[in-house]
Amino acid sequence: MPEEVTRSEIDEILFNALRTIFAFEREKVFVFDLTYGEIYLLQFLRRRSNAPMSEIATEMHIPISTATRLIDRLEKRNLLSRRKCDNDRRKMLVTLKEDGKNLVGQVEDHTYDIIINNLKKFSNQEILCFIDTASKLKEILLTK
């Protein structure tokens, strides 16, 4: 790591990034009347198709009981459904319904439009640098 970057600079950069992401996500929560966890779950299910309850809880780092309440709320809004697994009747699979697919599409369109619009302010080199860094965030930020 370059010696000229201090601990306090890293702390400030990360705090400002967190503040910005928090504000960005809060706007989606307001616009789409969903919690952040609900948005994340819908996006996860769009990529995963049928997911067992236990996998959802693991993915979201929440207890099964919390995942159940989250799924209950989204099921009442007709955004997803659950059914018993054909191979293992003890396992519940959660599936995105058509209304859920439409809503997650709207959320992702909203996100895409904002990002694309804001990227117009930057040079191609800056955009490529952003994309490169964003694609490596998992490696940069995760502890495991």
Image (tube, grey):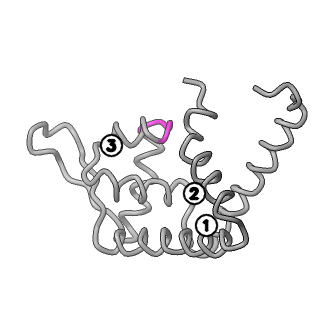
How far apart are labels 1 and 2 at the CA level? 6 Å
Q: Is residue 90 positioned above or below 31 on the image?
A: above
- Left or right of residue 102, residue 14 in this image: right
Q: Which residue is mark 3?
A: 53
Q: Which residue is mark 1?
A: 29
Q: Quadrant of residue 126?
A: bottom right
Q: Residue at x 69, y 65 (%)?
A: 123
Magenta span: 60-64
Mark earlier in primary sequence (1, 2)? 1
Dot 1 and dot 2 residues touching (CB under 8 Å): yes
In the image shown, does 31 or 47 lie closer to the viewer?
Answer: 47
In the image shown, does 116 or 31 lie closer to the viewer?
Answer: 116
Q: Is residue 131 magenta?
A: no
In the rendered structure, which amino acid carries the disc numbered 3?
Answer: Met
Q: Is residue 64 positioned above or below 3 on the image?
A: below
Q: Quadrant of residue 1?
A: top right
